[in-house]
Image (cartoon, grey):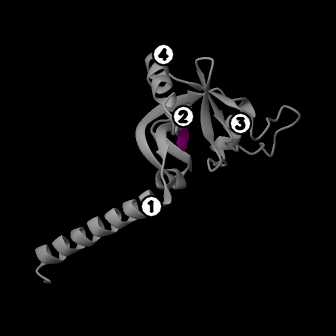
């Protein structure tokens, strides 16, 4: 059987980019059981309540919901169990230095398969206040309006 190539998105946390200002993004592997992988391949997962913690020099993904595999038997997994993330030692050290600052958290952004392996994209992020969110929305709207004006100008409509 030929090996799977490319990136297949399973789940995405769109709200995280709105609620947090992203500083760094890392790609990490995950330690999963067989039924978790089968459930992910079926495209079923939720990152909405997910976060990552740093415990004893290891990063653990918590709160991510991977539902039980429907054809699974007594070997099925627990849907919200903690899952160990696999990163290089230098990446772990970099993340550990940043997480010790106040207001910094680790948030999962996307869950996907890359070349057959389950990966999670985690971000070192700082929580946004409501006025920061409004400011980001205003900046995005003004940029969109400027792009539209430039497009209309280039087409000769204005």
Q: Choose the circle earlier in sequence order: 3 or 2.
A: 3
Which of discs 1 and 3 lies nearer the camera? The answer is 1
Q: Nearer the viewer, residue 98 or 27?
A: 98
Question: Residue 34 sits in which quadrant?
Answer: top right
Marks 1 and 3, how far apart in space?
Answer: 39 Å
Q: Nearer the viewer, residue 113 or 124?
A: 124
Which of discs 4 and 2 lies nearer the camera? The answer is 4
Mark 2 and mark 3 in contact (Cβ < 8 Å)? no
Q: Position of residue 41 (x, y in %)?
A: 64, 42
Residue 112 visible in this rendered orientation of the protein = no
**Residue stretch in magenta:** 106-110
Identify the residue shown where x is 48% and y is 56%: 18
Identify the residue shown where x is 47% and y is 43%: 126
Q: Choose the circle earlier in sequence order: 1 or 3.
A: 3
* Residue under pointer 1: 131
Q: How many numbered marks are there?
A: 4
Residue count near mark 1 (Cα–Cα under 10 Å), binned few <14, some 14–19, many ≥20: few
Which of discs 4 and 1 lies nearer the camera? The answer is 1
Q: Choose the circle earlier in sequence order: 4 or 2.
A: 4
Which of discs 4 and 3 lies nearer the camera? The answer is 4
* Residue under pointer 3: 36
Mark 1 and mark 2 in contact (Cβ < 8 Å)? no
* Residue under pointer 2: 119
Q: Choose the circle earlier in sequence order: 4 or 1.
A: 4
Marks 4 and 1, how far apart in space?
Answer: 37 Å
Residue count near mark 2 (Cα–Cα under 10 Å), binned few <14, some 14–19, many ≥20: many
Which secondary structure, mark 1?
helix
Q: Position of residue 117 (x, y in %)?
A: 55, 31
* Residue under pointer 4: 89
Residue 127 visible in this rendered orientation of the protein = yes
Which secondary structure, mark 2?
strand
Q: Choose the circle earlier in sequence order: 2 or 1.
A: 2
């Amino acid at each position: 059987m030929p090996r799977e190539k490319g990136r297949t998105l399973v789940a995405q946390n769109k709200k995280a980019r709105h609620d947090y200002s992203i500083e760094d993004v890392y790609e990490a592997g995950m330690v999963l059981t067989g039924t978790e992988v089968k459930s992910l391949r079926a495209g079923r997962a939720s990152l909405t309540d997910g976060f990552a913690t740093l415990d004893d020099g290891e990063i653990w993904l918590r709160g991510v919901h991977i539902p039980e595999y429907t054809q699974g038997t007594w070997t099925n997994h627990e849907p919200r169990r903690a899952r160990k993330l696999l990163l290089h030692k230098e990446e772990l050290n970099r993340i550990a230095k940043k997480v010790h600052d106040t207001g910094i958290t680790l948030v999962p952004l996307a869950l996907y398969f890359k070349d057959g392996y389950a990966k999670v994209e985690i971000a070192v992020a700082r929580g946004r206040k409501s006025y920061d969110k409004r400011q980001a929305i205003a900046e995005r709207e003004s940029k969109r309006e400027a792009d539209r004006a430039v497009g209309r100008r280039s087409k000769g409509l204005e």
